[in-house]
Image: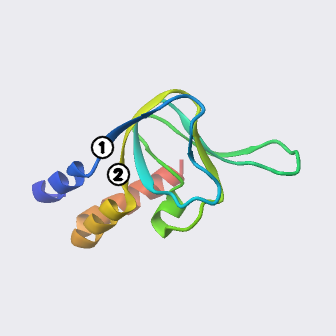
Amino acid sequence: MNDEEWNDFESIWQPFAAKRKTILTATGEIEKYLYLVAEGVQRALLLKENGDKDATLVFSYAGSFSGVLDRFLLQQPSRYFLETLTAREFIRTTFNQVNDLMKKYHNVDTFVRKSLAFTMAG
């Protein structure tokens, strides 16, 4: 990204903190935020209603993006929960802010899509 693109991208992030065992996104909710983890661990999980164990899909750690990423990009109800496993600190931005910059700058679009793909790939 050039300086203008980076400055615009950097300006959309806000600090946010959550305590341990906080549900950030629940099944059926549309993922509102994209998180960049500064500290702590969280997981996306599927709660099973038939009494089976919950299924953890992915963990996110410091330095990675977090959120129910496919539902963030699609703006559709989540099939999963996102919860903090430890107290955490991160920065977050909204779908509209990211989407506006992705429309405005091809380099931001490429950066976000590749970063999220790498995050989803583990």
Q: Please tell me which residue lies in front, 18 or 67.
A: 18
Per the image, the residue denoted by label 1 is 14
For the point 26% across and 52% down, the residue is 12
Residue at the limit of the structure toward the bottom, as seen here = 103
Q: State the residue at coordinates (59%, 64%).
A: 77
| SS at circle 1 | strand
- Secondary structure of the residue carrying tag 2 is strand
Above or below for 49 versus 78: above
Identify residue type, mark 2: Thr
Spot occupied by residue 42 in the image (x, y as percentages of width and height): 55, 37
In the image, 102: left or right of 38? left
Q: Residues within 10 Å of mark 2 (few under 14, many from 20)?
A: many
Proximity of marks 1 and 2: CB atoms separated by less than 8 Å: yes
Residue under pointer 2: 93
Q: Is 86 rendered above or below residue 14?
A: above
In the displayed structure, would residue 104 be above or below residue 85?
below
Who comes first in sequence, dot 1 or dot 2? 1
- Give coordinates of residue 74: x percent, y percent: 50, 69
Q: Is residue 38 visible?
A: no
Estimate how packed mark 1 is, as few (under 14), some (14 to 19) or many (20 or more) residues with alpha carbons within 10 Å: few
Residue visible at 43% across and 42% down?
Answer: 64
Q: Considering the image in quadrants, where does the N terminus appear?
A: bottom left
Q: Is 67 on the left-hand or right-hand side of 99?
A: right
Specify whether 47 is left or right of 110: right
Residue closest to the eye, 120 or 46 = 46
Q: Which mark is residue 25?
A: none
Q: Identity of the amino acid at label 1?
A: Gln
Taking 54 as reference, is 121 left or right? left
Q: CA distance from mark 1 to mark 2?
A: 6 Å
